[in-house]
Image: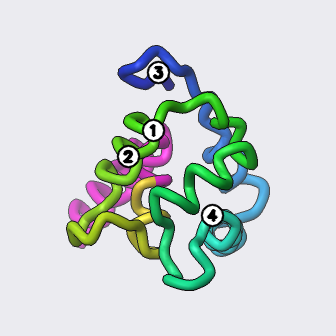
Amino acid sequence: MACRNGVVFEDFFPAMVEKLGAEGFMKELCNGFRLLVDGDRGVITFESLKKNSALLGLQDLSDEEVKCMLREGDLDGDGALNEMEFCTLMLRLSPELMNTSIKLLVEAIVNF
């Protein structure tokens, strides 16, 4: 998947879901959240994301790019990501998982 700034991310999430199952995959996303969280605030902040960006291989991101990532996932406007916002953002960044989710929703509606 390509990002606006030209950074390309490979989408490993579908393979992870296939291998771990949905529940196992969600546990892994939650583990990822815990790696990036600000221990004092319990959310991912600009500072905690910047400090831990090397864990994601994103140590070369500019401050503006890190802020953009936070804004993209910040649903409640508090400037940080809670666990739900983080997991939602991660799922949104996986086009294949989003397409699969849409297909499952349509099937459920049709079969209702």
Q: CA distance from mark 1 to mark 3?
A: 19 Å
- Residue tagged by mark 1? 63
Of callouts 4 and 1, which one flags the residue occurring earlier in the amino acid sequence? 4
Q: Where's the C terminus, which quadrant?
A: bottom left
Classify mark 2: helix, strand or loop: helix
- Disc 2 marks a residue whose amino acid type is Lys
82 horizontally vs 40: left or right: left
Classify mark 3: helix, strand or loop: loop
Part of the protein shown in magenta: 90-112
Q: Position of residue 57 (x, y in %)?
A: 71, 37
Which residue occupies the foreground of this view, 37 or 88? 37
71 horizontally vs 11: left or right: left
Q: CA distance from mark 3 to mark 2?
A: 18 Å
- Residue tagged by mark 2? 67
- Disc 4 marks a residue whose amino acid type is Leu
Q: Position of residue 96 (x, y in %)?
A: 48, 38
Compared with 47, 8 (above or below) is above
Q: CA distance from mark 3 to mark 4?
A: 23 Å
- Disc 3 marks a residue whose amino acid type is Ala
Q: CA distance from mark 4 to mark 1?
A: 16 Å
- Residue tagged by mark 4? 36
- Disc 1 marks a residue whose amino acid type is Asp
75 horizontally vs 23: left or right: left
Of callouts 3 and 4, which one flags the residue occurring earlier in the amino acid sequence? 3
Tell me the residue at 22%/71% (across/down): 76
Of callouts 2 and 4, which one flags the residue occurring earlier in the amino acid sequence? 4
Compared with 37, 63 (above or below) is above
Any magenta on residue 110? yes
Q: Position of residue 56 (x, y in %)?
A: 69, 44
